Image: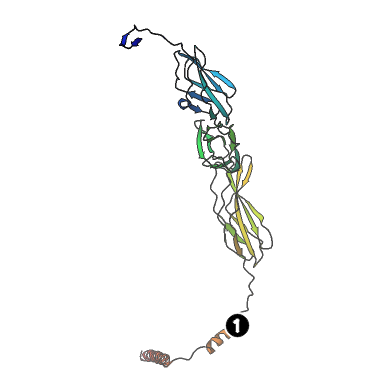
């Protein structure tokens, strides 16, 4: 301190120090609050405000109608147990030995939605080496991504077989009459949802392949021979064949059942059109499994022919002589020459006999 008069300023006094008492801390700036939002959690962190002369002891966090307090002066907290897709008002307050400071400006934070639940898995198509699976109604309005997994028969571990937005998938290269296990989960921008329950579907037995159209030979008025190529064997199961015959006026009926690849059909009608077809039959332990019929082969039996009476040979010769064309001059010259030669030879032989 220094005194002043008309003569001038006097000397300063000795220095004296004093200290103001501490007060409650300042407000936390919302610009310094960082958030990490989940479906049911909100993680908050912030920069420590001015403590106003007294160290900060803890923080109060008001979220909705609930108050949370940090452990010590740690400027972060993770609040759990929140409702997905819900808006919360959040405020932060610092506390020191003097008392609590003012709350920060309120922040509105919206929790994220839950990942989608798994769909129900169905099998809409069976065959001996494939399974067609579907889930949903074919409309993917939420743009979900689906991951379908199948249990490997070798490792017994689930491996992905499809991932994408489609709601149907055909699993191929399977074994006949074998059970396969599947599970599925859905994903969206919120994350991966839980796995579904395990679904098990079984492939069917393989049908015998369709045969080529049979060949028909040795066709007569009342019979014919039918042949066909054998079907490829399926495992150790026996294969037999079923031959059917039909006409335009009648349906197909079975003529032959057996293991041979040929059959002779008798008692047919002359001049009639017939169709034949053949199918392979697989004999399994639990019954017969017929395959599809081959394309039809159409044929017609020969008609009855009228036999004409042959005319006598004499009449034929006379007719042939009458209908013959006249000889030319050259042909007549050759005939006369041959006749004179024959006569000369005969005369020579007679003279030789007389002289001897």
Quadrant in which residue 285 is drawn: top right
- Could you tell me which residue is drawn at 60 percent across and 23 percent down? 65
Q: Relative to the observer, which residue lies in front, 33 or 345?
A: 33
Specify whether residue 129 is in view: no
The percent coordinates of residue 202 (x first, y second) are 59, 38
Q: Which residue is mark 1?
A: 312
State the residue lying farthest toward the front.
Answer: 6
The percent coordinates of residue 209 (x first, y second) are 56, 49
Q: Relative to the observer, which residue lies in front, 9 or 257?
A: 9
Looking at the rendering, in which quadrant would you find the N terminus? top left
The percent coordinates of residue 345 (x first, y second) are 38, 89
Q: Is residue 14 above or below residue 180?
A: above
| SS assignment at label 1 | loop
Q: Relative to the observer, which residue lies in front, 208 or 191?
A: 191
Quadrant in which residue 3 is drawn: top left
Specify whether residue 255 is in view: yes
Looking at the rendering, in which quadrant would you find the C terminus? bottom left
Q: Relative to the observer, which residue lies in front, 145 or 31?
A: 31
State the residue lying farthest toward the top.
Answer: 14
């Amino acid at each position: 301190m220094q005194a002043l008069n008309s003569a001038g300023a006097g000397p300063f006094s000795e220095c004296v120090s004093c200290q103001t008492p501490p007060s409650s801390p300042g407000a936390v700036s919302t610009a310094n609050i960082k958030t990490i939002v989940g479906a049911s959690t909100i993680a908050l962190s912030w920069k420590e405000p001015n403590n106003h002369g007294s160290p900060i002891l803890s923080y109060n966090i008001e979220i909705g109608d609930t108050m949370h307090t940090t452990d010590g002066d740690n400027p972060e907290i993770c609040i759990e147990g929140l409702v997905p897709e819900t808006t919360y008002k959040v405020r932060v307050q610092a506390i020191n030995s003097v008392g609590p400071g003012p709350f920060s400006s309120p922040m509105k934070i919206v929790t994220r939605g839950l990942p989608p639940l798994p769909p129900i898995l169905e099998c809409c198509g069976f065959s001996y080496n494939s399974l067609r699976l579907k889930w949903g109604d074919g409309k993917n309005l939420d743009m979900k991504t689906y991951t379908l997994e199948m249990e490997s028969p070798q490792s017994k571990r689930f491996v992905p077989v499809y991932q994408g937005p489609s709601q149907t998938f055909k699993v191929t290269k399977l074994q006949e009459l074998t059970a396969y296990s599947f599970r599925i989960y859905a994903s969206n921008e919120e994350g991966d949802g839980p796995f579904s329950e395990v679904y098990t579907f079984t492939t069917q037995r393989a049908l015998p392949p369709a045969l080529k159209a049979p060949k028909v030979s040795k066709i007569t008025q009342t019979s014919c021979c039918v042949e066909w190529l054998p079907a490829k064997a399926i495992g150790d199961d026996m294969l037999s064949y079923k031959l059917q015959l039909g006409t335009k006026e009648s349906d197909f009926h079975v003529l032959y059942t057996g293991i041979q690849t040929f059959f002779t059909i008798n008692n047919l009608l002359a001049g009639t059109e017939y169709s034949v077809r053949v199918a392979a039959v697989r004999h399994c332990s639990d019954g017969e499994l017929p395959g599809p019929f081959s394309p039809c082969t159409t044929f017609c039996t020969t008609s009855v022919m009228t036999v004409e009476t042959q005319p006598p040979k004499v009449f034929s010769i006379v007719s042939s002589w009458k209908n013959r064309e006249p000889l030319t001059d050259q042909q007549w010259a050759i005939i006369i020459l041959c006749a004179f030669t024959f006569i000369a030879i005969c005369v020579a032989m007679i003279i030789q006999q007389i002289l001897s």
